[in-house]
Image: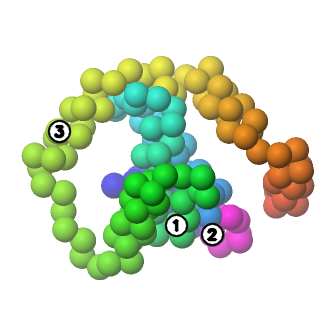
Amino acid sequence: MPEKETLERARQDKREGKAASTQAGEFVREEIEHIREGKHGARSTKQAIAIGLSKARRAGVKLPPSKGSSKETKEQAQRDLRKSTKGGTKKTSAKRSRATRAALKREGRSAASKTALSRQARAAAKKRSAADRSRAAKKAAKTRKK
């Protein structure tokens, strides 16, 4: 369950008319913080981001899966989105919850390091065209607070 502050920041972003990815960014930030403070670890930065995006979808952020993602990832995104709309979802069993937490506890903390995050961001940016990056930067500049 995401923290109250994270939900509030995401709602604030939505009110300001920001993109779904910006709203989801709050959940990813929370996940990175959890890893940094030692709540649990992650195998890779990609996994930490995936956990954050999943939490965002379950919290009601209408975030579609990326175009290049696998069939399994797209199905999981659909499940997460369905969980947000359905009222009274079933609670995860204590056994499963404990197992997940224990598995993440065994993972390292380096996935949330500045180096790892920088490497991930650079790799993600490299996949995009110059025009796409430029468009995104212009859009960001337009929505930046004065």
Please tell me whether mark 1 sits on a helix, a strand or a loop.
Answer: loop
Residue at left 61%, top 58%? 67
Q: Is residue 99 above or below residue 111?
A: below
Residues at discs 1 and 3 in contact (Cβ within 8 Å): no
- Residue type at numbered disc 1: Val
Tell me the magenta residue range: 12-19
Please indicate whether residue 102 sits to the left or right of residue 66 in the image: left
Q: Quadrant of residue 141?
A: bottom right
Report the mark closest to the observer, 3 or 2: 3
Residue at left 62%, top 64%? 20
Dot 2 corresponds to which residue?
14
Dot 3 corresponds to which residue?
99
Residues at discs 3 and 2 in contact (Cβ within 8 Å): no
Residue at left 87%, top 55%? 135
**Image quarter in which the C terminus is found:** bottom right
Is residue 136 inside the magenta stretch? no
Q: Quadrant of residue 83?
A: bottom left
**Image quarter in which the N terminus is found:** bottom left
Task: Say which of 72 and 105 sits in front.
Answer: 72
Please tell me whether mark 3 sits on a helix, a strand or a loop.
Answer: helix
Mark 1 to mark 3: distance in Å? 27 Å
- Residue type at numbered disc 3: Ala
Please tell me whether mark 2 sits on a helix, a strand or a loop.
Answer: helix
Residue 1 seen in the figure? yes
Dot 1 corresponds to which residue?
61
Residue at left 40%, top 62%? 75
Is residue 14 inside the magenta stretch? yes
Residue 5 seen in the figure? no
Task: Say which of 3 and 21 sits in front.
Answer: 21
